[in-house]
Amino acid sequence: MRTHLRAAAAAAATLLTVCVTVQPAMAQSVPPSSGPVPAVAPPPAPPPSSAAQQAALDACLARLRTDAIARGVPREAAERHLAGLERDPSVLESLDFQPEFRTPIWDYLAGLVDGQRVDDGRAMLERWVEVLTAVEAKHGVDAATVVAVWGVESDFGRATGRKPILRSLATLSCEGRRQAFFRNELLASLRILAAGHVDPAAFNGSWAGAFGQTQFMPTTFLEAAVDFDGDGRRDIVGTVPDALASTANYLRRAGWRTGEPWGWEVRLPEGFDASLAGRTKRRPLADWASRGVRRVDGRPLDASQTASALLLPAGPAGPAFVVLRNFDAVYAYNAAESYALAIVHLADRLRGGGPFVTPWPTDDPGLSRAERRELQTLLLARGHAIGEADGLIGSNTRRAIRAEQARIGLPQDGRAGMKLLTALRRDPPGTPR
Ligand code: CA
């Protein structure tokens, strides 16, 4: 759930550009994917805070406490939850972090929609079938879509983030270039705790404050989280039915249409004008059909007036998609087309669908999480000090990959792809370098 964060980043950058001279890169400095599968490893740990920096934070928090109480947060909650918070310099580093490596969409999707996630998701569909059926009846969003969001946002509740939300938001409310935005989130987080929705000891999440199995920002929680098990608490951290229903409720509020597909993978006719592609360039479905666009299963598109758009995520040589309103509802959850495509594709796979029919335009496909761990294990066996084989491709792993690419004679781009994995599999440790 980075939507509101990203919108605020853009708005803040626009304002700042008017008022003062700023670096043009500011508008792009929020990582495109700060969720469960980061495109890059976090930046190295910043130096510890000085006593003066901590004192400045304490003074700022005293002002925020007064403000929160004035805005209706119970005094006891404001005093308790804003007391003794230590400054966390790492979240300020994350705020300004510029990824040095842009992830190709086929790598992004290979890590998010892999065999393990499909198997896990099918198991969750079975395990939570009664809840998911009730969620669909109440909120109108199908089980596969809800489970797909759950899998991508938090790996089905296993990866919800470890940073204490209050500490992160307190730091970001008092330092850095987005303080107004984060103060609003801090205020919302105090309201959540004061109402007793979430266990304070379990109130952890991403560096920016997204938390729980749905990775909602605190303000989004207040708007969209629901109490589905009826215990009076909207607990998206510790209660799976609340988390699943909250996801469905968010999507419904974002315009989800019950029973309508998200869209389809399609095939384009020869000579198709690729400039017609774009998520906001909407046309009637009948218009695409009349231009010769067909579903990859050979069936025609409905000759209806339903608004739809054509996506070419890797250009005209890669897979093509016609998307409807429900794709936009998923896009609202996290404003990236690659993210929305991961969700809807995972949902299709959970329903028994196969991989995309048209291959990505690359001769070096992306790796699943299991393959990333295997690649790291092979790098470790060759003596590269990259830490643990955790499947996260960070700067140490990229450095080791570049060294091996140089040795093998591949382009030294630091990318974890199938060509390098295949080469290292054939080339056991002990082979002279
Ligand atoms: Ca509940």
Image (spheres, rainbow, N blue to C red):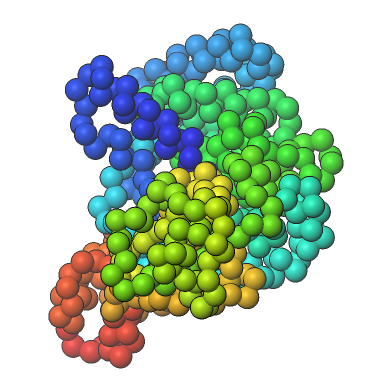
**Which residue is at a point 17% across and 70% down the rendered structure image?**
412
Q: Which residue of the protein is positioned furthest toward the right in this rendering?
A: 230
- Give coordinates of residue 226: x percent, y percent: 73, 39
Residue nearest the viewer, comparing 400 with 214: 214
Query: Does the rendering let one see residue 396?
Result: yes
Q: Is residue 127 above or below residue 307?
A: below
Identify the residue at horizontal 29%, vertical 22% (top origin).
16
Q: Residue 136: horizontal and vertical position, in percent?
A: 75, 54
Q: Name the residue nearer the viewer: 50 or 258.
A: 258
Residue 46 in view (yes/no): no
Is 417 left or right of 134, judged from the image as shown?
A: left
Quarter location, residue 115: bottom right
Q: Is residue 286 above or below residue 269?
A: above
> Picture coordinates of residue 221 (x, y %)?
63, 36
* Quadrant in which the C terminus is drawn: bottom left
Q: How many marks?
A: 0
Q: In screen coordinates, is 179 left or right of 144?
A: left
**Residue nearest the observer in this picture, 217 or 393:** 217
Look at 66% across and 44% down and name the residue there: 252
What residue lies at 61% left-to-right and 55% top-to-bottom? 150
Left or right: residue 339 compared with residue 364: right
Residue 25 % position (x, y): 24, 37
Is 305 drawn above or below residue 218 in the view shown? below
Q: Is residue 323 above or below residue 385?
A: above
